[in-house]
Image (cartoon, helix red, strand yellow):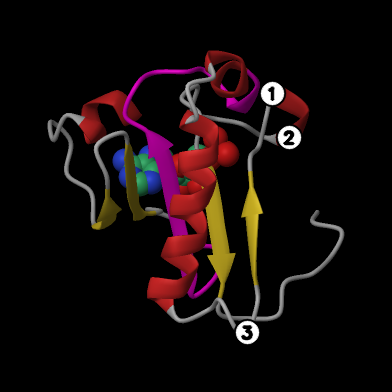
Amino acid sequence: MFCAIAAGQIPATRVLESDRTLAFRDLNPQAPTHVLVIPKEHHADVAALAKAGAGLLDELLAQAHEVARAEGVSETGYRVVFNTGADAGQTVPHAHAHVLGGRALTWPPG
Ligand code: AMP
């Protein structure tokens, strides 16, 4: 489904875009800033993305930090999360980083 967002076939509120990544707002935000950053190329999860190499995971993380800056939370603090697999609650099998901020975040997460 996130492939369809990357292709523009499903609407999303885009925040930042590069040749290989796209950042858009989460439909069900858990914090004032809740943005998802995906590789446009399909990888099922962050482990597959790491294996793919070619600097794509580095670029995705750099983009996540750029999102935090653009959202004004880079100074106040933010969290970058990759839910991976069932126990972590991954519901969409396309690698995505959650960028969360804009409020005090509890640790550990539930
Ligand atoms: P995860 O549980 O880590 O797989 O996260 C999937 C996230 O995608 C959830 O936070 C959903 O709210 C979000 N989500 C699902 N569909 C969409 C969509 N079409 N546009 C934006 N966010 C979405």
Q: Which residue, given by chain and number where applicable, does mark 3 sit on?
A: 76
Q: How many marks?
A: 3
User: Label 1 amino acid?
Assistant: Gly
Q: Position of residue 91 (x, y in %)?
A: 55, 30
Judge the density around disc 2: few (<14), some (14-19), many (≥20) Cα neighbours within 10 Å: few
- In the picture, the disc for residue 88 is 2
Q: Which residue, given by chain and number where applicable, does mark 1 sit on?
A: 85
**Span shown in magenta:** 30-47
State the SS at label 3: loop
Task: State the separation of the CA atoms marked 2 and 3.
Answer: 26 Å
Residue at horizontal 45%, vertical 81%? 72
State the SS at label 2: helix
- Which numbered disc flags the more N-terminal residue, 2 or 3? 3
Q: Position of residue 94 (x, y in %)?
A: 46, 25
Q: Are marks 2 and 1 in contact (CB under 8 Å)?
A: yes
Residue 73 visible (yes or no): yes
